[in-house]
Amino acid sequence: MELRDYQQTCLDGVHDALVDHQRVLLEAPTGSGKTVMAAWMCRAVAEIRERAYFVCHRRELVQQTVQTFDRVGLETGVIAGGWSERPAAPIQIASVQTLTKRTAKVPAPHLLIIDEAHHTAARSYSHLIEAWPAAFVVGLSATPCRLDGRGLDDWFHHLALGPSVAELIEAGWLSRYRLFAPAAPDLAGVHTRAGDYATNELADAMDRRDLIGDILEHHQRLARGRKTIVFATSCAHSRHIVERFNAGGVAAVHLDANTPTQERAAALRQFALGRYDVISNVELFGEGFDLAANAGVDCTVEAVVSARPTQSVSIWLQQVGRALRPKAEAAIILDHAGNALRHGLPDDPREWTLEGRKRTRKEIDDQVVPVRRCPTCFNVHRRELLRCPACGHAYASAPVPQKLIKEVGGELVELKRAQIELHKREERAVVARAKTYDELYAIGVARGYQKPASWARHLINARKAKRMGVAS
């Protein structure tokens, strides 16, 4: 497995930083191959007859990491429950849960690599760093930030920046995408806890028949036949989504972290081979999850449905990142959670830092919607564009900044009803400005209606009937 040019550049940057800094965090986007880069770091350590530990934050990620290291040709051992140990192997892949219990029993590593390093503030990771104070530490993260605004500079001394999502898309290492936001949910009354929406209240707000029906309808319009991952808010919500897809003739299956390992692997394989079109999951296909490795066969996700609102830009980018593996056609992202309106587009420029930063009340109050949503086809794009890149709809004026959220009783409340009504008025205005059958038909096609011709004829006939009624 050869390194890509940007991967070699990242490794060179980490190597140079370690000359002056003992602990370095490497930021690189989801899909950039951070585990492959880690394998090459471990290879360099093994060549000088030293030890390296790669730490996974979930047991489910150990197996896929072993497979990646095997492809690089490395001899590895595993420190995790249920695995046979090979203590003589110079490279060990470990679950953080198991390794923290064995720091006194295993040799100190020369290099400690922490995957998904934005979790390093957790006590388990701090314990590892404190246990081996002489070790070099390299953290890996696509999103080096925390919901609570706390920085990572207590654990890392230097931030090495990898390529941006936009750069990887431009170079063909990540997929182009089209992002649609058919509607934003009303989350009024959903409280914020530990920096994100309260899980139980969020599930109640999202697990509704009308919202689930909307997911199926827009998936059939915009992503029919594509291998799709759905992110749900709860197991019940996910199962209801699956039931609705299956009832609509779309083969779907639910998975979560409690699904038995063999059952999960079988479902993933069937998804990869085309038996299922849709997998709906809860907290499974998030950080670091490699679907192809877990399915045992190559599998490219072609579409993502976000039905899980979040205040975490990290979770949002992990969701959409599932669909950004390279492919011939653009990925389809359907945002039914309002996340793009909160956090922007997957390839928007973002400034990462190790320093913590909490937003002030004024910054929260003044935050505006970072994107623009086309009222014709619901495509989400950059605010400064005066024409929709998906359907060509021309806007009558430059965008007017719209406040995203407001502060109520110390809690964040989702998009104001007035904003949602504004979107609806824009959509109605687009239809009202269309005077001919051809113009209406074009709108129907752009919005993905299954029968745009019938819809256009219905409106033309309704307008004629209304004019005749007025005339009489």
Image (cartoon, rainbow, N blue to C red):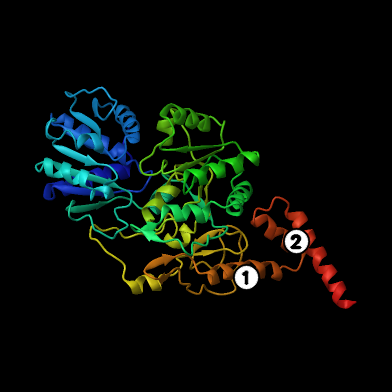
Looking at this rendering, what residue extends furthest in the right direction? 472
Which amino acid is tagged 2? Asp
The answer, for residue 306, to whether it is visible in the render is yes
Q: Is residue 439 left or right of residue 469?
A: left
Residue ID for mark 1 = 425
The residue carrying pointer 1 sits among few (fewer than 14), some (14 to 19) or many (20 or more) residues within 10 Å by Cα, namely few
Q: Label 2 near label 1: C-beta < 8 Å? A: no
Q: Is residue 464 left or right of residue 272?
A: right
The residue carrying pointer 2 sits among few (fewer than 14), some (14 to 19) or many (20 or more) residues within 10 Å by Cα, namely few
Residue ID for mark 2 = 438
- Please provide percent x and percent y for residue 121: 23, 51
Residue at the image point whose x is 39% and y is 51% from the top: 315
Q: Quadrant of the N terminus?
A: top left
Label 1, label 2: how far apart the Cα atoms are: 22 Å
**Element at label 2:** helix
Front position among marks 1 and 2: 1
Identify the mark nearer the N-term, 1 or 2.
1
Q: Nearer the viewer, residue 348 or 211?
A: 211
